[in-house]
Image (spheres, rainbow, N blue to C red):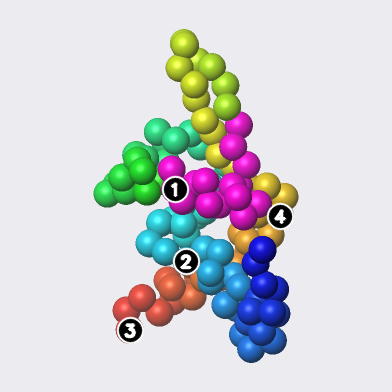
Amino acid sequence: MVSTAGAEAKMIDCPALVTIQLVSGKWKTRILWHLRHGSAGFGDLKRALPGISPKVLTDHLDALVADGLLTRSQSMRTNVLHSAYDYTDYGRTLIPVLDALGNWGLSHRGR
């Protein structure tokens, strides 16, 4: 069982930390950024994120699904199981946050 005392302390001390922990890491924010415009399959994400290993992509997608930010749908295509990922309604609440972070980054990238 996970203690909620630590999470409550983070909310009081710095609520932004909760968000940062959900999307932190080299790849999670990039995955979420890519999915802003609609669902994508595993192969699509792999091509959109050069340098990410299949294992790391799988691990991050699994974490984002477990955190309730993304949903995974599966279908059979020519005898191959195809997985597609998209935001949940809850996850979509992050899109304006990502947009704000992106806009701030564009404005300050030369510093």
Circle 3 SS class? loop
In x, y percent, where is residue 9?
Answer: 66, 84
Q: Residue furthest front?
A: 1
Q: Are marks 4 and 3 in contact (CB under 8 Å)?
A: no
Identify residue for label 2: 24
Which of marks 2 and 3 precedes in the sequence?
2
Amino acid type of the residue that numbered disc 1 sits on in the rendered structure? Asp
The residue to which callout 3 is attached is: 111
Ranked by sequence position, the earlier of labels 4 and 3 is 4
Res 90 label: 4
User: In what element is the residue under mark 4?
Assistant: helix
Residue at the top extreme, as displayed: 78
- Going by the numbered disc 2, the residue's amino acid type is Ser
Which residue lies at the image location 57% right of the left edge and 27% below the top edge?
Answer: 74
Q: Earlier in the sequence, mark 4 or mark 2?
A: 2
Q: SS of the residue at dot 1?
A: helix
Name the quadrant of the C terminus.
bottom left
